[in-house]
Image (cartoon, helix red, strand yellow):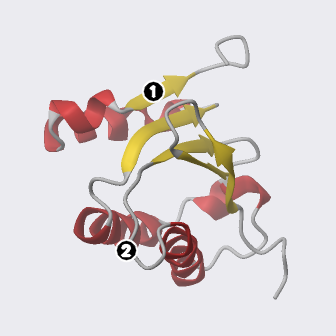
Amino acid sequence: KDPLSHCFLCIGQDVLGRHVIYSCTGRAANKTPEDGIEHMATELERLFQNSSMPGQIAWVLDFAGFGLADCNPKVAALALPMFASHYPERFGQIVCLSFPYAFYPLYAAGSRIFDKDTMAKVKILKSDKEW
């Protein structure tokens, strides 16, 4: 398969032993939501050996190059139920780099939907000066 089709990969471990996942939708050539979700699930299952191994991930979401082609609402409609049903405790930290200003209302809505412990795992770094 095309190695440039998706960008969701393990790049190592953090100081707490969590797998560090880097993703950048803007770098992904394949914009089909189902394909991206399948790739994420496959990578998570590989990391945790089909959910038989304990552990968490630190997910770095890089929004560099994010554009209109990446704004398919079907991605969230597929990803959120998958993560909530199959990987709810796998997320130890979520770091958003170059978070688009247009997404802040969605983040605010999420803070009313998800519990405080979940939202505390999300860090938004607005510029490379904060990285």
**Image position of 9 with respect to 96: above or below:** below
Counting from the top left corner in percent of width and height, residue 36 is at 58, 74
Q: Nearer the viewer, residue 76 or 3?
A: 3
Element at label 1: strand
Q: Is residue 106 left or right of residue 101?
A: left
* Labelled disc at residue 123: 1
Residue at 73%, 19% in the rendered image: 128
Type of amino acid under label 1:
Lys
Instruction: State how far apart marks 2 and 1 are (Cα).
Output: 28 Å
Vertical placement of residue 94 versus 51, above or below: above
Of badges 2 and 1, nearer the viewer stands: 2
User: Which residue: 64% across, 31% down?
Assistant: 98
Q: Quadrant of residue 110?
A: top left
**Neighbour class for label 1 at 10 Å: few (<14), some, many (≥20)?**
few
Q: Is residue 87 left or right of residue 48?
A: left
Q: Which of 18/108 is in front? A: 18
Q: Position of residue 127 (x, y in %)?
A: 67, 18
Q: Which residue is mark 2?
A: 52
Taking 93 as reference, is 81 above or below it? below
